[in-house]
Amino acid sequence: ARIVSCADPDPRGQEDARRLFGADVAVHDRYERMLDDELDAVFVLTPDHLHTKPALFFLAAGVAVFVEKPLTITLADCDTLLEAAFRSRTRLYVGHNLRHLPMLRRMRELIDDGAIGRVRAVWCRHFVGHGGDFYFKDWHAQRANTTGLLLQKGAHDLDVIHWLAGGYSRNVVAQGALAVYGDNPRRATQETVPPGLRMPDWFDPDVWPPSALRDLNPVVDVEDISMMLARLDNGVLASYQQCHFTPDYWRNYTVIGDEGRLENFGDGIDGDPARVDVWNRRRSGYRADADLSVPVVVASEETHGGADRALVEEFLRFAAVGGPTETSPVAAREAVAAAVAATTSLRSGSTPVDVPAPAPAIVR
């Protein structure tokens, strides 16, 4: 594959593109102009609330589209994109890279091999150790741009929960709060944070505790801690917890079957050691020695343990020749649907909310 064109309305982005890609790549200030460059495929990597329009534009033009996750921030826009891809017969792919994460692929293999019997429950705890820097200093901190972090950040994990469980959420209930960052008065101004800065410009891993962070986004109205429960269409029960002010940053999944359970320790995302432990032979009290302990080999020199490279390679193959992929636009839509419903529940007194299924014609 060869990069031939890119677009960014920000002059800094245009300058970066010229430096990264060289003089042979066309750089535009509007994505519509990219069609002049004879594209075969395109990556839509805008902020979440801006995914829909460019994705629709390129689908209508017959260009295979990669959309960064989440697919969109509303269920209506997700269904609009699925309908557009269905009617145009144009390939649509969503960047759920965790399905390529070595640790999670090993968990899925163990489940498929029958190591714990039939899956009955999936639990996920997500400790977002750099949440303040990553999500509360820019557009992520506003509901208008993300719906909420249960969607923006949680779409990854909800997709994985669905994948491991073999079903999709159909009823959810949630609680959450803006517990730490909402009370922080140290907000960014034009003087303290000039326009155009990006996360690497302000990220400082040494600031602790999270309440000491400075220059938060002027508007902060998304929750920094959330918890949800879900009942899937195949009867599996799921729980997801997300916290943006923990000292550690990793994901912990537990999958319980009717013949055992498995759990990961470390996730390999940053090249850290990871393993999957399985208890499936006998009852006991607490014991750290699992019946089976499976170390996970990760590409420590690559982002997300090699998952990002695998994701891009799969999309390029899909754009060129089609065929099955590890994820699908329908699965991506289902993750958004579950997250939107859970956010609605969270903000309406933890009322249970049904999750609507996609149109059957599009699923086929």
Image (tube, rainbow, N blue to C red):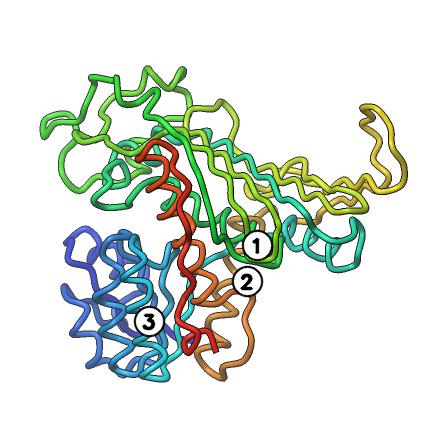
102 horizontally vs 116: left or right: left
Q: What amino acid is labelled 2 in the image?
A: Ala
Element assignment for label 3: strand
Q: Earlier in the sequence, mark 1 or mark 3?
A: 3
Element assignment for label 1: helix
Determine the residue positioned at 47% across, 70% down: 315
The disc label shown at residue 310, or none:
2
Determine the residue positioned at 73% across, 42% down: 262
* Residue 77 occupies quadrant: bottom left
Pointer 1 residue: 306
324 horizontally vs 284: left or right: left
231 horizontally vs 280: left or right: left
Pointer 3 residue: 42
The reply to whether dot 1 and dot 2 touch (C-beta < 8 Å) is yes
Determine the residue positioned at 39% across, 41% down: 150
- Residue 83 horizontal/vertical position (percent): 32, 74
Compute the Cα span from label 2 to label 3.
17 Å
Q: Residues within 10 Å of mark 1 (few under 14, many from 20)?
A: many
The reply to whether dot 2 and dot 3 touch (C-beta < 8 Å) is no
Quick one: 227 or 152, which is closer to the camera? 227
Q: Earlier in the sequence, mark 2 or mark 3?
A: 3
Q: What amino acid is labelled 1 in the image?
A: Gly
The reply to whether dot 1 and dot 3 touch (C-beta < 8 Å) is no
- Residue 252 horizontal/vertical position (percent): 60, 37
Q: Residues within 10 Å of mark 3 (few under 14, many from 20)?
A: many
19 horizontally vs 247: left or right: left
Number of marks in the rendered image? 3
